[in-house]
Image: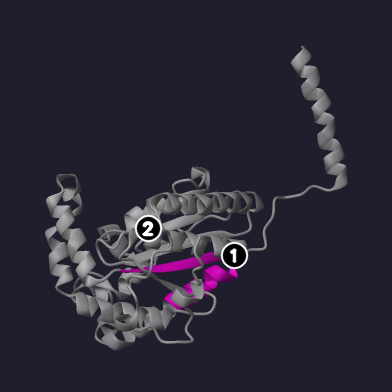
């Protein structure tokens, strides 16, 4: 794999993220299709091996969050990156518009109950960050649908500041309990996103992915970019940084995402459980028992 420095796309609160200066495309990390497949396969093998250790070790868990504009490539990236990880060790959850039941709870509730168990990787397609993205771009959601007291909704600036603080503290809480949070913003350009939406219209097999609302939301592109920029700057920390992944090239994006996850897993202090010598001696006795059973 061509050398790619993850630090180039990591924001940990030290520097400011500026969307206009952030790249949506970088030089290809691969020369040919075959090389890309080989590189991704190698990352798959590493990830699967590390996840097996995580599952057996049972002390850490990992939450992987994908945030992006529509058509940035979240679904395809998740499928490509995790397709060869043992299915018992991973699970996915896609957050859509909140249900009536979810709206009568606090905004973190629906995400909180989907957190990964120890030994597991859980992938969120969107997350609690929607509460400072979609809701911020459409503040009427806050006042008309979230059943909040008027003294909260009447102070809109404080609402967002409090939510940024709540989210950061929540992620610190997860880290303090052995859950690693890996956050990706798939940074697609407006032009590339537009082309992908057109493809969804022109390809009958992709029509189901297209909704008229996508066009309405796209008209609010600048407001969304402003919301993403502030969200990342307010919630990027040393322990829970954001990774801003150039998303105009899907293959590059998948390689980068896989590399980040593998590198984060390698940092964990985990190993397969080991018994003491007495346990090893006890287990060896069962070999004779099994061999004897085979002769019966």
Quarter of the picture holding the C terminus: top right
Residue 251: numbered disc: 2
Which residue does the image show at 17% across and 70% down from the upper left? 218
Side of 41 where 276 appears, left or right: right
Q: Mark 2 Cα within 10 Å, few/some/many (few <14, many 20+)?
A: some
* Circle on res. 19: none
Residue 247 as seen in the image, left or right of residue 197: right
Instruction: Give the mark nearer the N terminus: 1 vs 2.
Output: 1
Residue 204, picture quadrant: top left
Closer to us: 168 or 12: 12
Residue 264 falls within the magenta-colored stretch: no
SS class of the residue under badge 1? Answer: loop
Q: Mark 1 and mark 2: span between their CA atoms?
A: 31 Å
Find residue 188 and report its horizontal and vertical position in percent. Answer: 29, 69
Crowding near the residue tagged with mark 1, few <14, some 14–19, many ≥20 C-alpha atoms within 10 Å: some
Residue range highlighted in magenta: 167-187
User: Residue at 17% of width from left, 54% of height from top?
Assistant: 200
Q: Which residue is mark 1?
A: 178
Task: Name the image quarter holding residue 236.
Answer: bottom left
**With respect to residue 2, does 167 lie above or below?**
below
| Residue 29 coordinates in the image, percent (x, y) | 43, 63
**How has the structure been colored for display?**
one colour
In the image, residue 164 sits, relative to residue 53, either above or below, namely below
Q: Residue at x 85, y 36 (%)?
A: 282
């Amino acid at each position: 794999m061509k050398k790619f420095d993850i630090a180039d796309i990591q924001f940990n609160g030290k520097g400011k993220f500026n969307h206009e200066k952030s790249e949506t495309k970088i030089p290809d990390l691969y020369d040919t299709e075959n090389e890309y497949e080989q590189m991704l396969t190698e990352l798959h093998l590493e990830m699967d091996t590390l996840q097996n250790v995580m599952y057996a070790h049972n002390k850490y868990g990992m939450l992987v969050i994908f945030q992006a504009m529509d058509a940035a490539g979240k679904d395809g990236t998740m499928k490509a990156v995790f397709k060869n990880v043992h299915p018992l060790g991973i699970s996915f959850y896609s957050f859509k518009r909140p249900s009536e039941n979810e709206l009568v709870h606090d905004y973190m509730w629906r995400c909180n109950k989907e957190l990964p168990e120890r030994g597991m990787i859980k992938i969120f397609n969107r997350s609690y960050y929607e509460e400072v993205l979609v809701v911020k771009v459409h503040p009427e959601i806050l006042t008309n649908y979230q059943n909040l007291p008027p003294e909260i909704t009447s102070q809109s600036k404080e609402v967002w500041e409090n939510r940024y603080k709540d989210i950061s503290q929540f992620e610190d809480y997860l880290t303090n309990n052995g859950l690693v949070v890996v956050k990706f913003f798939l940074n697609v350009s407006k032009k590339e996103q537009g082309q992908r939406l057109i493809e969804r219209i022109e390809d009958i097999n992709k029509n189901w992915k297209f909704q008229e609302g996508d066009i309405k939301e796209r008209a609010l592109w600048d407001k969304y970019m402003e919301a993403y920029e502030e969200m990342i700057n307010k919630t990027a920390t040393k322990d829970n940084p954001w990774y801003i992944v150039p998303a105009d090239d899907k293959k590059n994006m998948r390689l980068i995402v896989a590399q980040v996850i593998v590198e984060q897993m390698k940092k964990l202090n985990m190993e397969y459980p080991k018994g003491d010598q007495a346990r090893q001696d006890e287990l060896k006795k069962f070999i004779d028992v099994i061999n004897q059973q085979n002769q019966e």
